Image (tube, rainbow, N blue to C red):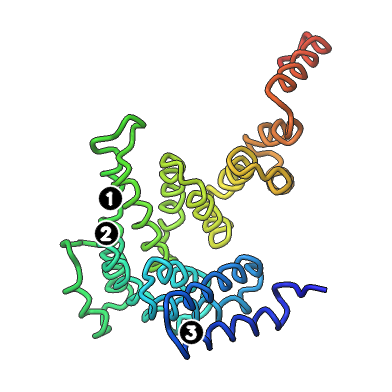
Amino acid sequence: MSCSPSTPSAEDELNKLAKAYEIQPNTERATAYLTKATDFIGENKNNMAQVMPILKKASEIAMDAKMLSRASGYLMAQIRESKEEEGIKENLIQLGGIMKSLNKAHAANIIFKGLMESFPNDIEVSALESELTAELASAEGYLNYLFDQVLVEPDEYGINRQNATKYVDGTEAFALTLPTDKNTPDFLYKAAEVARSLRTMPKAMALYDWILDKYPNHDKGPTTLFIKGFLLEQEFGQEDEAKLVYEKFLEMYPEHEMASSAKFLLSNMGKSDEEILKDIEEKRKANPDQES
């Protein structure tokens, strides 16, 4: 009988892989650990107490192995899911340094400036001013500037892809550094919409989930939940998961203006366009005095 990912044996295997890397650090052993860690994190994402130590170890090994892009992902998840203030400042400083090394100075600028706004009297944070690659009045002002650049010199799809990507990166940096700012959920929503325009659907979904997880009472919550269900169905082909989301939407927001759309999508899930049109026509014939 195989063991579930949450059993001690899975963690034992991770510990063995980590030990093997410590004994003989190399790319192959780092990759082996990070691959197993990523699977473990995904399969146990609802048990953050179990996942947090793995995120920490994964970020450490990725950093040591000079896998900076992967290190940033683990570090971002660690910061976002942390329930304690201890260590967040240090993790953000490290993340800012990684972003700068990855040629994402726009994200690094927001992290450094955000830290300076959050810790105005901290000597270590004040020293970050020398790391800024642009003169910033505020982290929010810079993020708004990045958003303004999204439509500058657009491509055939009506968006500047490079600037749009910078805005999404910058929004994530802002939300990690200033999660309690009143505008953070609005920025995340706009970034999710930009990610959809870029057709980077996994990123869009992650941003929508960020809003639902961390800002459940935000006024965009209902729309965000509806869009999540739509993306699950239309973009990812995950109809069972989409069905649950639509049902949750109707349970939570039965009077919402999008409730009728949720009901329509739910009742027609799995049907072809031809089948849907046939059903509409039959209903119209059966109820000629009612709009279909």
- Disc number placed over residue 39 in the picture, else none: none
Single out the mark in the foreground, 3 or 2. 3
Where does the image place residue 97, in percent across and percent down from the top left?
29, 73
Q: Quadrant of the N terminus?
A: bottom right
Report how far apart the C-alphas of labels 1 and 2 lie in the structure.
8 Å
Coordinates of residue 207 in the picture (x, y in percent): 49, 54
Residue placed most toward the observer, 48 or 236: 236
In screen coordinates, is 57 left or right of 136? right
Of 271 and 193, nearer the camera is: 271
Q: Nearer the viewer, residue 233 or 110?
A: 233
Q: Secondary structure at mark 1?
A: helix
Q: Give the crowd class for mark 2: few <14, some 14-19, many >=20 residues within 10 Å.
A: many
Real-space Cα separation, disc 3 to disc 2, in angstroms? 33 Å
* Residue on which the image places disc 2: 106
What is the number of the mark on residue 21?
3
Give the amino acid at mark 1.
Leu
- The answer, for residue 246, to whether it is visible in the render is no
- Residue type beneath disc 2: His
Label 1, on which residue? 146
* Residue 7 makes an appearance in the image: yes
The spot of residue 18 in percent (x, y) is 53, 84
Picture quarter containing residue 12?
Answer: bottom right
Crowd tier of the residue under label 1, counting other residues whose Cα lies within 10 Å: few below 14, some 14–19, many 20 or above: many
Q: Residue at x 16, y 74 (%)?
A: 130
Res. 159 image quadrant: top left
First-in-chain label (1 vs 2) = 2
Q: Earlier in the sequence, mark 3 or mark 1?
A: 3
Q: Earlier in the sequence, mark 3 or mark 2?
A: 3
Q: Position of residue 255 (x, y in %)?
A: 69, 39
Q: Identify which residue, 259 or 205, lies in the foreground.
A: 205
